[in-house]
Amino acid sequence: MLNIDWNNFLTLSIDWLLTSGLRIILYIIGGILVTKTVKKIGKDIIKRFEDDDTTTRNDEERRADTLVSVVNVTTKVFIWVIVAFMILREVGANITPLLTGAGVAGIAIGFGAQNIVRDFFNGFLILLENQFRIGDVVTIAGRSGAVKEINLRTTVLRDLQGVMHVIPNGEIKAVDNMTFTESRAVVDVGISYDSSIDGAIEVLGKIGDELKADGELGRFIRVFDILGVNNLGDSSVDIRVMITTEPSQQWAIGRKFKYLVKTRFDEAGIEIPYPHQTIYIRKETGE
């Protein structure tokens, strides 16, 4: 039967709790305080760049969101790795092999895990060059969506169907950013060959004025341009309109513009043609 000196065990336990146990608690509290402090500082930095418009995020706000997000994640990982090593030391674990293993792992990464190194390096360049920010709508690595997260190793997109795409930064060779500093809605408006081009352009100008006066969307329009006749199609004369908007507003404004085109053209009697065929049937008469 195992004999236990409970008095000695209790004394040792109390001594451990008052020394190593207390230090472990302090390490955990310190880790929580540091991460929360960094997070609070990040929020304060973001507030400095925020404007009075709470419905959209300007370029400076998106840039701040991106950098603060990366700093928060990096700080959290770094702090808790350190806390974990310190706790292991307090419970009597020999952390020297772990540190040595980390050095060996670093060498292994350098020689055998080059893709991970490439991901981190590309992530650093993306942040440094400000290629895209959280909230931008982009196409990268053949996938399109809104940027939800930018980490040093991966970029996370969410598309219109709600699908989340996690893309290693090393796969990002080219970026199509549809919302960087400004956006554009380019629409070709087709009218029939029997309709007046000048009359259609006049109506389009009035539609532009109506859009600019819109209480909800008008403030997002920077420039409304009627570029003129862009194409003489099989069944229509196409007039190109380009609307320069605030970032990410081109889709909503483009939808409203198309609605107004159909409505106002109907009122003005301007035909919007659709492809059709006329079939002639010739009847052969016998001799």
Image (cartoon, rainbow, N blue to C red):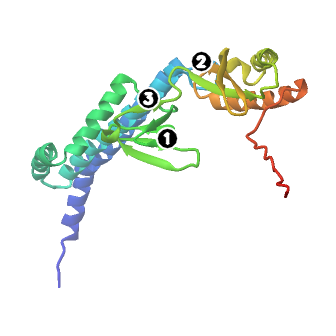
Disc sitting over residue 132 in the figure: 3
Quarter of the image for residue 11 reads bottom left
Q: Answer with mark 2 or mark 3, whichever residue precedes in sequence.
A: 2
Residue flagged by tag 3: what amino acid is it? Phe
Amino acid type at mark 2: Asp
Please give the label number shown on residue 144. Answer: 1
Q: Label 3 neighbourhood size at 10 Å, few (<14), some (14-19), many (20+)? A: many
Of 216 and 224, the residue lying toward us: 224
Helix, strand or loop at mark 3: loop
* Image point (33%, 24%), residue name: 128
The part of the image, by quadrant, that contains residue 5 is bottom left
Residue 265: image location, x then y, percent: 84, 27
Residue at numbered disc 2: 51
**Front: mark 2 or 3:** 3
Q: Is residue 247 visible?
A: yes
Q: Earlier in the sequence, mark 1 or mark 3?
A: 3
Across and down, in percent, residue 253 comes to 69, 27
- Count of all numbered marks drawn on residues in the image: 3
Q: Is residue 149 above or below residue 191?
A: below
**21 vs 153, nearest the viewer:** 153
State left or right for residue 141 relative to residue 184: left
- Whether residue 55 is visible: no
Between disc 2 and disc 1, whose residue precedes? Answer: 2
Instruction: In the rendered structure, find residue 16 and report the number of the disc placed on it.
Output: none
Q: Nearer the viewer, mark 1 or mark 3?
A: 1
